[in-house]
Image (cartoon, rainbow, N blue to C red):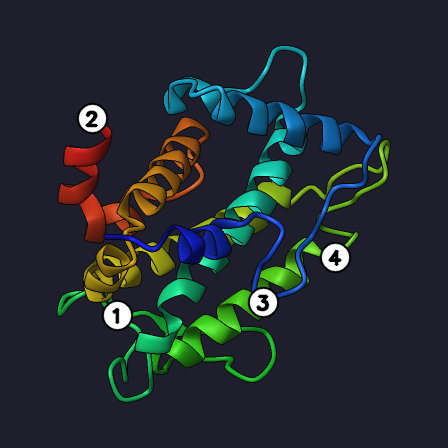
């Protein structure tokens, strides 16, 4: 039996494990964020909920979703992080066939094998820096997005997808124990429909969860 209090803590959208990017009330993105939330709360088919609303800019719609996915996926990982240790997960992987190596512009200039918790820390910090960078995710209405915005977004989303891979393949028993499968599955479906609707992740990146996705999303 799941503990409703624990679930409420885990999925309370105002409590994340790190400072979260919020949209300022009164801005166009805040309105878009509310629109996206309203269609989810109304139980709208997720495939329809991800479609670009008439008259809205694609980059605005994508920006709102990237921030939301980051917050949700961060929370999902937070729920199982006590069981994801240097010892239990010495390699960031998705089963025996997939290993993910970390690379960035600073310390790890070459793809480097890391433990899953270390990889996750670097990943979450890296995404947070991107979404809080006004040059990449401008908050002021009228400030244009950079020309490479969708390229940056593709990198963010493909890396966030790896969190789902690791959680589903290595920690699903913990998710089940918490009674959180329905929440995690809904979040995954929402994410999957969004990235496929706008072609934001390469098909080969989606391979590790291909069979599960076929069962869940088609």
Query: Do the residues under discs 1 and 2 have CB atoms within 8 angstroms?
Result: no
Look at mark 4 in the image and give the residue it sits on.
133
Question: Compared to 62, does 69 lie above or below?
Answer: below
Q: Is residue 56 left or right of residue 127?
A: right
Say if residue 102 shows up in the picture: yes
Q: Do the residues labelled 4 and 3 touch (CB within 8 Å)?
A: no
Q: Mark 1 points at which residue?
A: 93
Number of marks in the rendered image: 4
Q: Residue 126 carries which label?
A: 3
Dot 1: within a 10 Å radius of its alpha carbon, few (fewer than 14), some, or many (20 or more) residues?
A: many
Q: Label 2: how many residues lie within 10 Å, few (<14), some (14-19) or many (20+)?
A: few
Residue depth check, mark 2 versus mark 3: number of the one nearer the observer: 2
First in sequence: mark 2 or mark 3? 3
> Which residue is pictured at 69% across the width and 41% down the height?
147
- Please give the name of the residue rendered at 43% of the width and 32% of the height, measured from the top-left corner: 194
- Pointer 2: what residue? 218
Residue sitting at 49 percent across and 59 percent down? Answer: 74
């Amino acid at each position: 039996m799941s503990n409703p209090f624990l679930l409420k803590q885990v999925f309370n959208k105002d409590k994340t494990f790190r400072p979260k990017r919020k949209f300022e009330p009164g801005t166009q993105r805040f309105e878009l964020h509310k629109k996206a939330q309203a269609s989810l709360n109304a139980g709208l088919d997720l495939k329809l909920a991800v479609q670009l609303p008439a008259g809205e800019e694609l980059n605005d719609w994508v920006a709102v979703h990237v921030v939301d996915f980051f917050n949700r996926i961060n929370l999902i990982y937070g729920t199982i992080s006590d069981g994801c240790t240097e010892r239990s997960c010495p390699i960031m992987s998705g089963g025996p066939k997939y290993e993910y190596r970390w690379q960035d512009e600073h310390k790890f200039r070459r793809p480097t094998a890391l433990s899953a918790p270390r990889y996750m820390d670097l990943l979450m910090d890296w995404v947070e820096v991107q979404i809080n960078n006004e040059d990449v995710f401008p908050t002021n209405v009228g400030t244009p997005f950079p020309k490479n915005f969708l390229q940056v977004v593709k990198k963010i989303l493909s890396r966030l997808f790896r969190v789902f891979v690791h959680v589903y393949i290595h920690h699903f028993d913990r998710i089940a124990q918490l009674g959180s499968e329905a929440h995690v599955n809904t979040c995954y479906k929402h994410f999957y429909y969004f990235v496929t609707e706008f072609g934001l992740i390469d098909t080969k990146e989606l391979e590790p969860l291909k069979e599960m996705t076929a069962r869940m999303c088609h």
